[in-house]
Amino acid sequence: MFIRAVAGLLTVLCVAEAQQVHLRGLQVTPPEGTSLSASEYEGLVGLLVQEGELGVLGNATTKLTPLYWTAAHGTAWRKVLVRVGDAEPLVFIIRKDNYVFGAFISDRLLLSDDYPTDRREYESDVWLFSLAGHFPQPTKINLYGGGQIVRVAERRGAVYGARVWIGGRFSLAMGYGGDGRSAAADIRSCRHYTTGSDVPEGYTGVKNENGTAFLGGSMEFMADDIEVLHVIG
């Protein structure tokens, strides 16, 4: 009986240690002000701290602080700019049906000096990710071929018919108006596709015959929710 109890205790301790190693450095409980579940939050932080991917960002204190959420702050682009301010780096979360995905940028949202209708384009470390609906596990989607670009419109401006483009003109757009000229009033109006050469193996989401992936289920879609979080650590 004693030996069996000791063996059981050792098993529990081993499992606990394995969980501790798996979760070490991750704030598993999501902060207030986000729709992310515990598993989604852990998966996202896990992508952020992958060894060798983000240099100084990849450390044991990395966490996310919510800045903006359409459900709480409205859907206007000016609300995004006010709430996000000068924070950097940033993570954008998009929900559409059973899909949860988004983008990371290493810089803040840089605005043009020609306020309020101009736009600005700048280089930034950029990658996309999926937390649910596309892969068996949270997955990073690296962008190549000029994908390290962010384009940001001023409060009343537009950039290629959107409020912001992440990953170049042909990656992820939010506040997309549909005509390539005028931006949408609702930031949840999105456009996205990732060319097949950038899509990791194991993708099970919507794609066309060329392997181009549509993380939102189609090239143009209305997101259910959009969030912006600040990466700290």
Image (cartoon, helix red, strand yellow):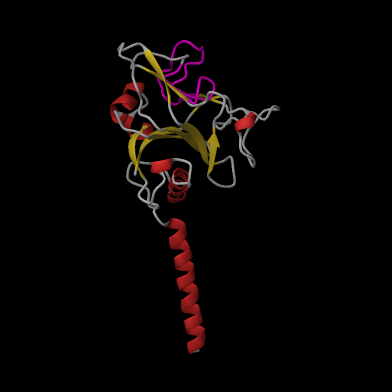
Q: Is residue 181 left or right of residue 199?
A: left
For the residue pair 3 and 233, the one nearer the viewer reads as 233
For the residue pair 175 and 230, the one nearer the viewer reads as 230
Above or below, 18 against 191 in this view is below
Q: Give the range drawn in magenta.
A: 162-190
Does the image show residue 23? yes
Q: Is residue 216 left or right of residue 208?
A: left
Q: Residue 45, percent across and down?
A: 43, 46
Q: In which quarter of the image is residue 218?
A: top right
Q: Residue drawn at (56%, 41%), measured in percent from left and top?
A: 133
- Residue 187 lies within the magenta run: yes
Q: Residue drawn at (61%, 34%), measured in percent from left and top?
A: 199
Callout count: 0
Q: Quadrant of residue 184?
A: top left
- Residue 94 lies within the magenta run: no
Q: Residue 129, percent across and down?
A: 51, 37
Hey, which residue is sitting farthest right in the picture? 209
Does the image show residue 95? no
For the residue pair 40 and 51, the one nearer the viewer reads as 51
Q: Residue 8, percent across and down?
A: 49, 78
Q: Main secondary structure of the magenta part?
A: loop
User: The C terminus is located in which quarter?
Assistant: top left
Q: Residue drawn at (38%, 51%), measured in percent from left and top?
A: 60
Q: Residue 178, percent across and down?
A: 51, 15
